[in-house]
Amino acid sequence: MQITGIAINADATRLDGSLDLLRSELDYFGEAGFDHVEIAPHGVGALLNGELCRKQMELLLQVLGTYPFSYLVHGPNPMNLMDREAPQLELRMFRASLEFAEAIGAPVLVYHAGRFLPEERFQLPAQDSLTPAYTQQLWDLERGLLQELGEVAAQHGVVIAIENARPYLDASPYCYGEFLASLAAMARQVAHPRVRVALDLGHAYLAACHHGYDLLEGVAAVAPYVGHVHLHDNFGRCCASYEKKQGELLATGRGDLHLPVGWGEVPAREVFDRLQDYRGAVTLEIRPRYRPYCHEALINARALLGI
């Protein structure tokens, strides 16, 4: 492996569009020792109805320009190329996210793998039946759009990294990205040098435990396509999509906790042993409630990665 830096996520929900809070976070991240920061365009208020807010972008670039960080970009969580209700909005938002990444000098845009059933529809009645024919139609749609967007990404000097999905008790499998072998198949079929995989270790461990597949075999399948890595911890027990109280989930060791590395049971060392050809940054995606432990997480990550 050649790790080019360790990033920390500037949490989109915590920022809620505030550039003053972003300054405070960047100050803290610098003091903690990070050299990369993951920024989300929706977190800094830079997207409106799928398009960039030019005035907000000007203000954002003024802020970011005063810091020495390198940046990575995480696209809006709901962005879904399989969405059939507002497909043009999804494409606008994706293109705007690529433009955002280029504007802040980020080489990677992370995109959550397309969802056959989007999270916002989990609890609604009259759901589409996820038949093999229907999911194949959506698979083909996403594959074709990623091929097209790979060309757009190349124009912006950005790599699209498709992130594997966490499972839920009430809806899985809602996304092909719950299965690393399926994610590898998508990257292989897209076959574009600007479309890679963002391997999220926490999500992968939850999905392997929930669906009963071998995590390390899945990592080996996806390894040739990995273009970015997310690192955080949990205990391998998923929760329902409507369970949002992190204190309760932490107490029971359930859900996508996004703990500092070393707090849970994700076999990170064994995973990285299967990523010997990986070159790039590693992002510590940690929930804001663990913000006081960012420096500890950085120390643990450096020890784990031997850097």
Image: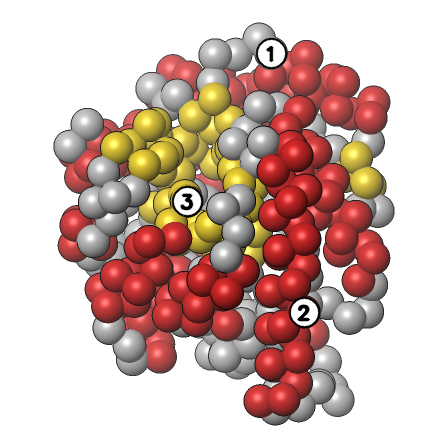
Which secondary structure, mark 1?
Answer: loop
User: Relative to the observer, which residue lies in front, 6 or 135?
Assistant: 135
According to the picture, the residue beneath numbered tag 1 turns out to be: 65
Q: Which mark is residue 106?
A: none
Disc 2 to disc 3, how far (Cα)? 22 Å
Q: Residue at x 78, y 70 (%)?
A: 84
The percent coordinates of residue 85 (x first, y second) are 81, 69
Q: Earlier in the sequence, mark 2 or mark 1?
A: 1
Q: Amino acid at mark 3?
A: Gly
Q: Is residue 173 above or below residue 109?
A: below
Tag 2 near tag 1, CB within 8 Å: no
- The quarter holding residue 287 reads top left
Looking at the image, is mark 3 or mark 1 nearer the viewer? Answer: 3
Q: Residue at x 73, y 67 (%)?
A: 83
Local crowd size for mark 2, using a 10 Å CA cut-off: few (<14), some (14–19), many (≥20): some
User: Relative to the observer, which residue lies in front, 210 or 177?
Assistant: 177
Tag 3 near tag 1, CB within 8 Å: no
- The quarter holding residue 188 reads bottom left
The percent coordinates of residue 164 (x first, y second) are 45, 60
Which secondary structure, mark 3?
Answer: strand
According to the picture, the residue beneath numbered tag 3 turns out to be: 227
The percent coordinates of residue 73 (x first, y second) are 56, 37
Disc 3 to disc 1, how far (Cα)? 25 Å
Disc 2 to disc 1, how far (Cα)? 38 Å
Q: Earlier in the sequence, mark 2 or mark 3?
A: 2
Q: Which mark is residue 141?
A: 2
Q: Amino acid at mark 1?
A: Gly
Q: Amino acid at mark 2?
A: Leu
